[in-house]
Image (spheres, rainbow, N blue to C red):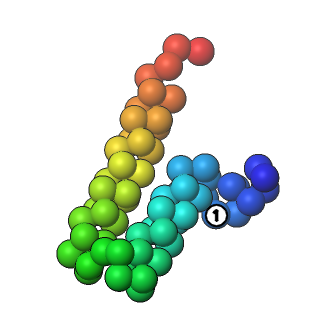
């Protein structure tokens, strides 16, 4: 599983892609509209970016 995470770009990116696929399936099955899809995608990748930023900041500022 670790090799797959490394290939995709990490654990957070893997789950972001899964959520993107779920949101896209919701649009095609008429469970959501394009505006809802767009809003969800903004939250998915916003959370991904914030998570990466916090992780890199904490790794940079950690005392070794």
Rate crowding at label 1 as few (under 14), some (14 to 19) or many (20 or more) other CA atoms within 10 Å.
few
Q: Is residue 8 above or below residue 61?
A: below
Percent position (x, y) of residue 12? 53, 50
In the image as oriented, which residue stretches furthest toward the left?
35
- On the image, the x and y values in percent for residue 36 come to 25, 70
Vertical arrangement, residue 57 with respect to residue 47, above or below: above
Residue at (70, 56) in percent of width and height: 6
Question: Left or right: 36 with respect to 50?
Answer: left
Q: Is residue 21 visible?
A: yes
The outermost residue toward the bottom is 28
In the visual, does 38 lie left or right of 44? left
Residue 61 coordinates in the image, percent (x, y): 44, 23
Quadrant of the drawing holding the C terminus: top right
Looking at the picture, tell me which residue is in the foreground, 29 or 46.
29
Q: Which SS class for mark 1?
A: helix
Nearest the camera: 56 or 29? Answer: 29
Q: Residue at x 59, y 58 (%)?
A: 14
Q: Say if residue 24 shows up in the picture.
A: no
Q: Which residue is mark 1?
A: 8
> 37 or 59, which lies in front?
37
Residue at 76% across / 50% down in the picture?
2
- How many marks on residues? 1
Location of residue 58 (image quadrant): top left
**Position of 2 compared to 45: left or right?**
right
> Looking at the image, which residue is at 41% across and 75% down?
26
């Amino acid at each position: 599983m670790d090799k797959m995470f490394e290939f995709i770009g990490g654990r957070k990116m893997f789950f972001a892609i899964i959520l993107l696929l779920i949101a896209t399936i919701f649009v095609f099955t008429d469970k959501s509209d394009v505006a809802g899809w767009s809003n969800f995608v903004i939250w998915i990748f916003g959370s991904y970016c914030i998570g990466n930023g916090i992780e890199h900041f904490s790794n940079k500022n950690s005392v070794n």
